Image: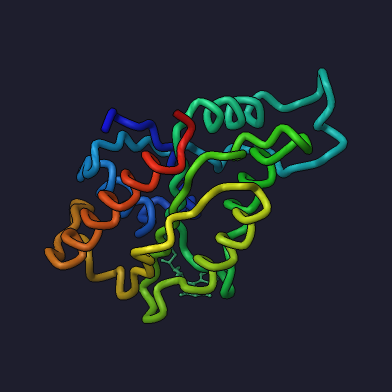
Amino acid sequence: MSTKDVAVFVGSLRKESLNRKMANALAGLAAGGLKLEIVEIGQLPLYNQDDDVAGKVPPAWQALRDRVKAAHAVLFVTPEYNRSVPGVLKNAIDVASRPYGQSAFDGRPGAVISVSPGAIGGFGANHHLRQMMVFLNVPMLQQPEAYIGGAANLFDDKGNLSNPGTREFLEKFMEAFAAWIERNGKK
Ligand SMILES: Cc1cc2nc3c(=O)[nH]c(=O)nc-3n(C[C@H](O)[C@H](O)[C@H](O)COP(=O)(O)O)c2cc1C
């Protein structure tokens, strides 16, 4: 398998975000020969279709669309807000999915890991995200599913993953994702 470029969306802007820690930990694992890079989404103007016309498109929207188009695959690492996906992530997905017919996501394989301090591990966000990806033609990794609960206890004070069981699970997850990209990605 050759190295694959994976654009990573983190659904939280919080400085001490557990999800960002998770995304950084995953990048450090480098499992499956994947190269992970976080795509920043906090600076994106809110999507407004009036601005999605030649000459008006905000540069940050274009940069996101170009970044996703250049990637082999996409990975979402997200908290759950009110049993769904945080607005900041929804906005980034909306931006990269337009203009209609030119979605940057089209055909790129994807995966989602939801991370929460709560017990349910962000199940609601995980599945709302999957619903969007059906429409956007992103084949999503099915197994293993990744609902990471109790996440406040998984990292040390430097942000490193300190739970060996979780690390082992994530390595398996990334190996499965690499095989999924190989099977479903553009050749
Ligand atoms: C607006 C809001 C809604 C939330 N709703 C949920 C929820 O539905 N389920 C859940 O498990 N946690 C919920 N939480 C708690 C988050 O899981 C928690 O703040 C988590 O640390 C956010 O992820 P982060 O650490 O990456 O920022 C909510 C937090 C906020 C701010």
Number of numbered tags placed on the structure image: 0
Q: Which residue is drawn at 69% across and 46% down?
A: 94
On screen, residue 64 versus residue 179, left or right, reads: right
Instruction: Determine whether 15 is above or below 185 in the image.
Output: below
Instruction: Determine whether 87 is above or below 4 in the image.
Output: below
Quarter of the image where the N terminus is located: top left
Q: Quadrant of residue 82?
A: bottom right
How is colour applied across the structure in the image? rainbow
Instruction: Determine whether 84 is above or below 89 in the image.
Output: below
Q: Which residue is drawn at 22% across and 44% down?
A: 31
Of 166 and 17, the residue lying toward us: 166
Quarter of the image where the C terminus is located: top left
Measuring from the top left, give residue 127's x and y in whole percent. Answer: 54, 68
On screen, residue 174 versus residue 127, left or right, reads: left
Q: Which residue lies furthest to the top in this view?
A: 55
Q: Is residue 156 visible?
A: no
Of 88 and 114, the residue lying toward us: 114
Q: Is residue 140 visible?
A: yes
Q: Residue at x 39, y 69 (%)?
A: 116
Measuring from the top left, give residue 109's x and y in whole percent. Answer: 48, 44
Measuring from the top left, give residue 63's x and y in whole percent. Answer: 59, 26
Q: Quadrant of residue 66?
A: top right
